[in-house]
Amino acid sequence: MKALKKGTKVDHEKYGIGIITDVSLTSYEVLFERGGRLQFSKNRFEADILEEEPDDTSGNTDEAVKAQEILDALERLLDRGAALQE
């Protein structure tokens, strides 16, 4: 699998749809709709790429802001759901 970037939308067989929220030298951190926040080794991560983050936004920060707003909202929803289950 090719190197993925922060903001890439993926579909994992076990955890469903998620967004890559962090990329380190050896791992990806992915926030899943139904699996929460998980880390995967880059060498072993297998998922279908649904939407890739573009290489160059050409100075258009509106899209980047929208993506971050979506990530923040998704994280708040997951936190609320976890609190309700307690």
Image (tube, rainbow, N blue to C red):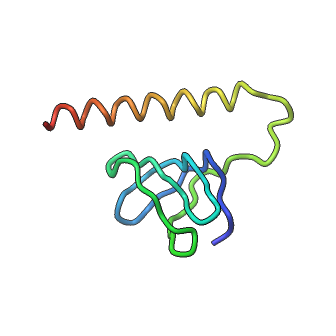
Q: How many marks?
A: 0
Q: Identify the residue at image location x=59%, y=66%.
A: 26
> What residue is rendered at 57% in x and 49% in y?
22
Residue found 40% across the figure and 49% down from its top? 37
Determine whether 37 is above or below 60 in the image: below
Snapshot quadrant of residue 4: bottom right
**Going 48% across and 30% down the picture, which residue do you hit?**
72
Q: Quadrant of the C terminus?
A: top left
Q: Is residue 37 left or right of residue 5?
A: left
Residue 24, horizontal then vertical, whole percent? 61, 57
- Residue found at the very far left of the displayed protein: 86
The correct choice, above or below, for 5 with respect to 48 in the image is: above
Relative image position of residue 62 (x, y in whole percent): 71, 24
Image location of residue 8, percent across then percent down: 60, 50
Query: Is 42 placed left or right of 58 in the picture?
Result: left
Look at the image and tell me in which quarter the N terminus lies: bottom right
| Residue that extends furthest to the front in the rendered view of this protein | 25
Seen as rendered, the residue at the extreme right is 58
x, y percent for residue 75: 41, 34
Q: Nearer the viewer, residue 52 or 30?
A: 30
Q: Which of the two residues, 13 or 29, is positioned nearer the viewer here?
A: 29
Left or right placement of residue 47 versus residue 16 in this view: right
Residue 80 higher or lower than 9, as above or below: above
